[in-house]
């Protein structure tokens, strides 16, 4: 299993957000399931798609629905896409009649291809809840936005990543202090897609510089400290 696979978020609590209020909303949709469809919007790489995936995964687990990917990508919008959504919904609702969840990435692409149709779909199919994302909320008409709980997801600051970074480093056997992880993450300028790659590089560097003969690597803390300062 790769480093990325080992540390892919397993629940919404593993996600990192700039705004605690956004984290609370994501948690509510995962465990309490508000009735209004959800739209996460913001710049690329803020974790929107991952959040929707984990909301759906959590809800399916609570309802006893098998792990099936009920995701539609707006970039693949074509004639019959709404029939596909209904078929996905029916798979979920039979035989337990549980309200269905459909995840839509890049919903703006669907709206561009079929203006107004998603709004009509929401109105006609109350038993199907949409969990959607977009990088371009201005491409969605106000009539559609008003039918969605629109939540802006902003890019986390480097310090926001510190608790998650420490959890991953600890899982990899790198036991370092919180303050050192803060120092390490101060150099991180990427987004959610870059985060795990950045940590993997730091762990690999620590192991590379650790003396091969040492049972306990030369204080990995000092190695990561050097990495954080940019010195070999």
Image (cartoon, rainbow, N blue to C red):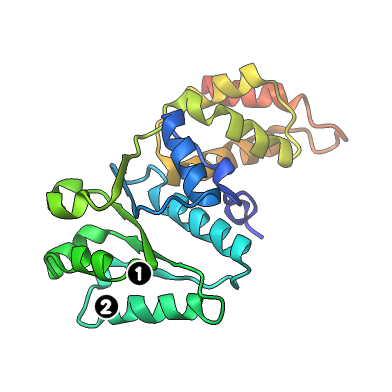
What element does badge 1 sit on?
A: strand
Distance Cα–Cα, label 2 vs label 1: 8 Å
In this figure, which residue is indicated by the disc labeled 1?
72
Viewport quadrant of the N terminus = bottom right
Eyeballing the image, is 26 above or below 120? above
What element does badge 2 sit on?
A: helix
Q: Kindly tell me whether residue 99 is visible in this rendering.
A: yes
**Residue drawn 28% across the image and 51% down it:** 148
Question: Position of 81 compared to 186: left or right?
Answer: left
Question: Position of 129 compared to 180: left or right?
Answer: left
Q: Kindly tell me whether residue 187 is visible in this rendering.
A: no
Quarter where residue 180 is shown? top right
Eyeballing the image, is 83 above or below 184? below
In this rendering, the count of numbered labels is: 2
Residues under numbered marks 2 and 1 in contact, where contact means CB atoms less than 8 Å apart? yes
For label 1, the crowd category at 10 Å Cα-Cα, with few meaning under 14, some 14 to 19 and many 20 or more, is many
Eyeballing the image, is 216 above or below 225? below
**Residue drawn 52% across the image and 31% down it:** 161
Question: Position of 55 compared to 171: left or right?
Answer: left
- Residue 205 % position (x, y): 62, 36
The residue most toward the right is 215
- Residue 177 % position (x, y): 69, 20
**Residue drawn 44% across the image and 40% down it:** 25
In this figure, which residue is indicated by the disc labeled 2?
81
- Residue 91 % position (x, y): 48, 80
Eyeballing the image, is 18 above or below 124? above
Q: Looking at the image, is mark 2 or mark 1 earlier in the sequence?
A: 1
């Amino acid at each position: 299993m790769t480093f990325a696979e080992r540390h892919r978020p397993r629940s919404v609590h593993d996600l990192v957000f700039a705004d605690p209020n956004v984290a609370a909303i994501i948690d509510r949709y995962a465990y309490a399931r508000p009735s209004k469809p959800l739209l996460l919007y913001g710049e690329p790489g803020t974790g929107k798609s991952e959040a929707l995936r984990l909301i759906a995964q959590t809800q399916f687990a609570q309802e006893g629905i098998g792990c099936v990917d009920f995701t539609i990508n707006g970039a693949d919008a074509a004639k019959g896409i709404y029939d596909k959504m209904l078929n996905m919904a029916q798979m979920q609702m039979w035989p337990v009649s549980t309200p269905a969840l459909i995840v839509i990435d890049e919903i703006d692409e669907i709206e561009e291809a079929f203006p107004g149709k998603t709004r009509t779909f929401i109105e006609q199919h109350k038993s199907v809840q949409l969990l959607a994302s977009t990088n371009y909320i201005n491409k969605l008409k106000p009539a559609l936005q008003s039918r969605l709980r629109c939540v802006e997801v902003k890019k986390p600051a480097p310090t926001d990543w510190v608790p998650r970074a420490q959890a991953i480093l600890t899982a990899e056997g790198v036991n370092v202090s919180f303050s050192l992880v803060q120092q390490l993450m101060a150099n991180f300028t990427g987004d959610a897609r870059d985060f795990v790659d950045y940590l993997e590089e730091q762990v690999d560097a620590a192991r590379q510089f650790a003396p091969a003969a040492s049972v306990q690597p030369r204080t990995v803390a000092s190695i990561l400290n050097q990495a954080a300062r940019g010195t070999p």
